[in-house]
Amino acid sequence: MTGTDSLPISIAGITKRYGDVYALDHVDLEVRSGEFLTLLGPSGSGKTTLLMALAGFTRPDSGSIRFGDREIVLTPPHRRDVGMVFQNYALFPHMSVAGNVGYPLRLRKVAKAEIAARVEQALETVKLAGYGERRVDQLSGGQKQRVALARAIVFRPRILLMDEPLSALDKQLREHMQIELRQLHERLGMTTVYVTHDQREALTMSDRIAVINHGRLMQLDAPRRIYDRPANRFVADFIGESTFLDVERDGDTVRFGGRPMAVGWMPEGDGPVQLLIRPERLALLTGEAPDGMNRFEGRVQAIVYQGDTALAYVALADGPEVALRAGTRTGTAFDRLARGDTVTLGLHRDDAVLVPVEGGGRR
Amino acid sequence: MTAVDLEPNADDLRRQGDRERWAMLGLASPAVLTVLVIMVLPVGWLFYLSFIGESGGFSLENYGRMLESKAYGRIFWTTFEVSFLTTGICVLLGYPLAYFFAQLPRRAAAVCMLTVLLPFWTSLLVRTYAWLVLLQRKGLVNTWAIDLGLWDEPLALVHNMTGTLIGMVHIMLPFLVLPLYGAMKAISGDYVRAAANLGAGPTAAFWGVFFPLSLPGLFAGSLIVFVLCLGFFVTPAVLGGGRVIMVSMQITTNIELFFNWGAASALGVVLLAITLGILFAASRLLRLDAVLGGGH
């Protein structure tokens, strides 16, 4: 099933209000052809509303949605030709697995023999060959997931939408399916818009992530950029663990507690900023600080053991508490840490990122 | 030297479990007793009476008469005809109604449902006589229809099968709409959305997905209506005008006119047996449906 054509999606000024609340507030978004784009946001952020607008189940108040050159904002859902995987799969319980997967082909009046062949092929693609005669309620959660996927791709749509498709699976299966969906996307190459509230899932699977909050696009970037260079405090806070330190900025000079700091990235303008600290980007310094390391002195308040890694909460000499995360390998300096120890923490200049305090909130 | 107890507290735990089971049985006994006294005993007595002949001894004559007499055959036939037609008309009227309600927002649906339920709280007798007033030769329906020029001569709308069916459908409709509405509400909107997404227009999505999924509810509602119809008395008695004789009415006649408890009991037993048979067959059919998972 390789060589499926894909289409870009062009979203412009999409707005949807419920009373006074903007579910979508003039959203502009370009999804590239063949790209795996994730809409990431907390519940109620508008990410699902946007997906439903793409599928045609939510009628926006205004705006334009184009699949390739075709304006589809007025097109009813059954003429949009997009595949969709629902959160609860929505497999028809009165049809067998083959009945479900063949349904879109029967609607398109495909010849019987061809339906059978394509259904089997689609089931093979999702590693369920030979499951056609099963009843839907005989399947496990992961299998239902695969059938839903097979049904969504069997009619070769050029755009695939997925609404939190893995949220009902347990952790191990979910992580396995993340990799599998990603591989499938690489094979089929169809433009995919994926909705999730799970930041780890978004980081794992996406070509690009669109972070959405209060119906607005907060940042659209590759996973690494989203994590390392968050555009505002909301993105920095929502993705990954984070502590924010108040710093003074004067032109290019940044000071924390009166001492100048080496900073890898700072936003434009001269609005108030904060230093973003990720626990795993802090280092426990034992001797001389290497070049480009900012130093913080502090005292260990608590240590939380989490198996593969542990968190040490360190109260900095100047007040705020930061968390330091490191692996639990035996014999390291980190492993020997105890409550009450005085420590020196290092933060590489490239990991020292400033984010604007303003922005990312409600309009 | 004491032996090590490999199953500590096993006996006490078992006894505690037994005590709990007995306590549960004790709590259930009022309900069991009630069912015994008001259901099992009367039906058993009915069963006994049906085998008592006019001589006062054991006899099969009550059942024999049912086989011999053509009148009885006709009565059973009428009973099934009325029940079947009522159920059919209820399905035709009730399905669109329940579907409409199921599409409404919850509050609006509750108000609409009230209009269906309101007649429920009026006496059956009152409603039946109200139909008599409406449907008779010079009743509202005939007068208005003639005034509007819909028909010239008063139609015989009552004291016959037509009147019986109109009255019975009116009374039975809620019994179909309520379970059907519940079943429709339980169908996730995602199924229809999924169908639309896969390319089904509204008509195709309805017949291909929504209707099959609503069938268990429709079946349950129809079954309730059909079984209730089998034993119906008041409405056919009043609106049938003596032309529509159902089993329940023959039972009354046997008792009030002929004081023949044996014959009446035999009719009751046969009706009960038929009803149970239908329920059994229906439950088998439903289970069969679940096993097959529906066709495609």
Image (tube, helix red, strand yellow):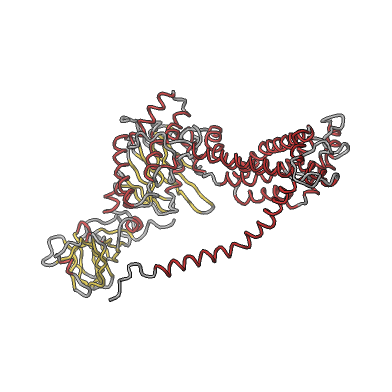
Residue A298 sits above or below residue A89 on the image = below
Q: If the image is split into quadrants, where does the C terminus of chain A sit?
A: bottom left
A271 sits to left or right of B208: left
Q: Position of residue A196 (x, y in %)?
A: 38, 49
Q: Residue furthest right?
A: B138
Q: Position of residue A251 (x, y in %)?
A: 25, 60
- Determine if residue A152 is in view: yes
Q: The N terminus of chain A is located in which quarter? A: top left
Residue at image x 32%, y 57%? A236
| Image spot of residue B48 (x, y percent) | 72, 48
Q: Quadrant of residue B2?
A: bottom left
Residue A217, visible in the rendered structure? no
What residue is at 22 percent from the left and 75 percent from the top? Answer: A340
Vertical placement of B208 versus B264: above or below? above
Residue A265 position by quadrant: bottom left
Q: Could you say where residue A29 lies in the image, as x and y percent from the top left?
A: 38, 43
In front here: A196 or A228?
A196
Which of A121/A348 is in front?
A121
Q: How many badges with numbers are in the image? A: 0
* B228 or B221: nearer the viewer: B228
A179 displayed left or right of B232? left
